[in-house]
Image (cartoon, coloured by chain):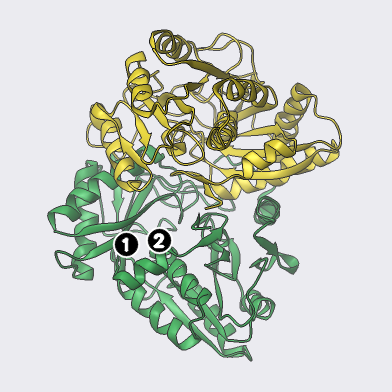
Chain colours: A green, B yellow
Amino acid sequence: MKNLMNHVDNALAESLDGFALANADIVLLGADREFVQRKNPKPGKVALISGGGSGHEPLHAGFVGFGMLDAACPGQIFTSPTPNQMMNAAQAVDGGSGILFIVKNYSGDMMNFQMAADMLDQENAIVVVNDDVAVEDSTYTTGRRGVAGTLIVEKILGAAAERGDSLKQLKALGDAVNKATASMGVALTSCTVPAAGTPTFHIGMHEMEVGVGIHGEPGRRRVPLASADDIAEELTSAIIKDLAVKPGQEVILLVNGFGGTPMLELYLMVNAAHKVLSKAGVRVARHLTGSYVTSLEMAGCSITACVADPEILTLWDAPVQTAALRWGM
Amino acid sequence: MKNLMNHVDNALAESLDGFALANADIVLLGADREFVQRKNPKPGKVALISGGGSGHEPLHAGFVGFGMLDAACPGQIFTSPTPNQMMNAAQAVDGGSGILFIVKNYSGDMMNFQMAADMLDQENAIVVVNDDVAVEDSTYTTGRRGVAGTLIVEKILGAAAERGDSLKQLKALGDAVNKATASMGVALTSCTVPAAGTPTFHIGMHEMEVGVGIHGEPGRRRVPLASADDIAEELTSAIIKDLAVKPGQEVILLVNGFGGTPMLELYLMVNAAHKVLSKAGVRVARHLTGSYVTSLEMAGCSITACVADPEILTLWDAPVQTAALRWGM
């Protein structure tokens, strides 16, 4: 394993310092690097906080800023942040209208965010994201995993919070968007957690892991590497089935790279996914393509669709200014 | 080698189709996929055209749009586009005020862009980018290579063209920005050109290639993998020396991933580069961090600095709306 690092124990801290330097117009780093917070918070707004293990960059710190998150708590690589981090982030960004936690469904994250939520004096709620249709229950999860769809939930809730929605409204909207969002991924190579030093899983030169999780967790099956069209067919069909998308409905389509897959291939997958959606009579109303929810340097991608009515599209299109997503301003 | 593809011969075409679908609000695909063009051209503006081998995405098609390029001509992977592509792109985006070609210094690109320029009826000029300080002359190049600094030249010229600068002014500005811009990179792994099927170069488990080119060309030396701080010291010092940056001067800092390196490590490199620049009394006025000028799935990164006066910073900050860079609108 080869990394651009000084010492593995300092890698996250130095990376967060670099992130804060590179995005000093948008974010501040909290004390002891416990969280990344929005530089210019909006008083009176519900504060949105997410977080989780590191190694998925730009998720979540890359989505802190106007129109998206107020704070993100980074855990060590593939390790949940602590309840203390979440509580301190909540104190820092509290705008007086309550705190909404957006949590990917992993047992460690769920336990720690719930603990923080219970201990907070402020009114709060949790939106759980569990968009991965690949498997029920997995290595680190009871129920379905939260993966790239988290970006969509964070973007839409961020826009709704910015326009002044209440905590109760945001909780309901977040649950609805999560329900309307489904993802599935495929891995061609493993990632290697630097502290472990060896690949998370072994995969043959001509194999792929269908339904892989964003920490390299096993998916549905290990099979010979298929064509892009066949992969898109399997992933997209599973998503369409899960969401029960009807012909004529519109979706936001996110083709997400896991870190080690070139953009050339991600765009090829967009083309492949379009063929499947088009055959099903589903129209892609908005696109996002890139490596946004990654698994270190794992090669592969996931496809995410979010069934979108005009209200959802308006919130998706609303201005956002974060390190990783910027438009409309 | 494992890729998300159907057949290697169709990969570029399918990827361009996906790119055009995903960015239909910004770009159009030219006939026979010869070029990607800006959807809403501005009449009377000098047209900016770039291009080069594919495999460096999002460069160049990802930079087509308001405030940057008017067209990009994609060659096959790591292969120059043809003069015909460039001439047809020029016909398509000609705004009546001349054509400026922005060309990375590789022998194939130089020859083909020069041929297109010679055959064009329109007034035109060429800005050559040769920002790579690693080596004089290389596998595909006479003189210095054009690498990630190309993004900076394209952004600044794009803003200047948008405000109405003439062809002559843009040519002079482009040459000046190129001269004020320097880059150097390091590779930890090789890339694999899909049509070749084997890694471009062999590199040991504990080695790195210092001064690597964006096609995996040899650099200055093959040495044991060093710490991030030592790498940043070597790359950044070479850049500072080449540009003769003085204490008190300001730079735009681009830390660019080659494709296979996680964002976590790129931000760590930002932090490391800052230490070197800070020691030299150089202030980073603007940052850009991400995998923008890639070599397929190669792991590693380059550091680019552009010495920036207030005029350059104003042009850098000017609104841009492309697939890969968006701000200010």
Helix, strand or loop at label 1? It is strand
Where is mark 1, residue-wise?
A183
Residue drawn at x 84%, y 35% as measured from the top left: B280
**Which residue is at the front of the view, B128 or A198?**
B128
Amino acid type at image mark 2 = Ala
- Residue B31 point in image, percent of width and height: 24, 28
Q: Is residue B205 above or below residue A328?
A: above
Horizontal placement of B32 versus B183: left or right?
left
Q: Is residue A302 above or below residue B206?
A: below
Residue drawn at x 42%, y 16% as measured from the top left: B122
Amino acid type at image mark 1 = Ser
- Residue A140 point in image, percent of width and height: 43, 69
**Which residue is at the front of the view, B242 or A203?**
B242
Cα gap from disc 2 to disc 1, whole angstroms:
7 Å
Residue A144 visible in rendering:
no
- Residue A306 point in image, percent of width and height: 31, 65
Where is mark 2, residue-wise?
A148
Tell which subunit mark 2 falls on: A
Residue B325 visible in rendering:
yes
Quadrant location of residue B164? top right
Let me know if marks 2 and 1 both belong to one chain: yes
Disc marking residue A250: none
Which of marks 1 and 2 precedes in the sequence? 2
Helix, strand or loop at label 2? It is loop
Q: Residues within 10 Å of mark 2 (few under 14, many from 20)?
A: many
- Residue B322 point in image, percent of width and height: 45, 43
Tell which subunit mark 1 falls on: A
Asked if disc 2 and disc 1 are in contact, CB closer than 8 Å, the reply is yes
Q: Is residue A58 above or below residue B234?
A: below
